[in-house]
Amino acid sequence: MNNRKFTIKQSFQFAFDGFLYALQTQRNLRIQLIVAIVVITLSTFLPMNAIEWALLFLLIALVIVAEILNTAIEKTIDLIVTEYNPLAKTVKDLSAAAVLFIALTAVVVGLFIYLPKLLAIFLR
């Protein structure tokens, strides 16, 4: 492993490169970002308090981070394992399950936040 020290600028560039790679190669990440943009846009038209905004951004970040970590885990397995291995499949499935779990949690929290607001608007 290379013990070379990198500048802060280089470290940020590596992070941006990683995000760009994930964005270019991971369809689910692109879908999640589109959903996030739609949710944030719609939220600007609803009465949202600071806690709700914080929850919204926290859950969006968690879903995106989970997707990026899932990609890293999958790529690491692909690097190490050259042919089918049931244990490698299990690791990949567990990683995908983590993304699914946090995404479903985000949906449930979103329903708690948005359903009363939307019902109040449409049941006037």
Image (tube, rainbow, N blue to C red):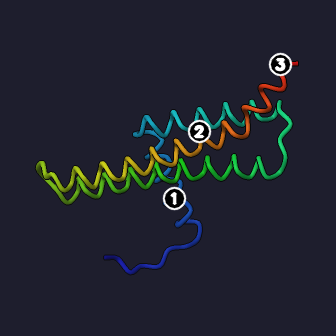
Please provide percent x and percent y for residue 4.
Answer: 41, 79
Q: CA distance from mark 2 to mark 3?
A: 22 Å
Labels 2, 1: front one: 2
Q: CA distance from mark 1 to mark 3?
A: 46 Å
Labels 1, 3: front one: 3
Q: CA distance from mark 2 to mark 1?
A: 27 Å
Placement of the N terminus among the 4 image quadrants? bottom left
37 left or right of 14 in image: right
If you read the primary sequence from the N terminus, does the residue marked by circle 2 or circle 1 appear first? 1
Q: Nearer the viewer, residue 47 or 4?
A: 47
The residue indicated by pointer 1 is: 15
The residue at the point 39 percent across, 52 percent down is 70
Label 2 Cα crowd, 10 Å radius (few <14 / some 14-19 / many 20+): few
Please provide percent x and percent y for residue 67.
Answer: 46, 48
Q: Nearer the viewer, residue 114 or 84?
A: 114
Q: Is residue 56 above or below residue 116?
A: below
Q: Is residue 27 above or below residue 106?
A: above
**Secondary element at image label 2:** helix
The residue indicated by pointer 3 is: 123
Placement of the C terminus among the 4 image quadrants? top right
Three-letter code for the amino acid on which mark 3 is drawn: Leu
**Secondary element at image label 3:** loop
Residue 107: numbered disc: 2
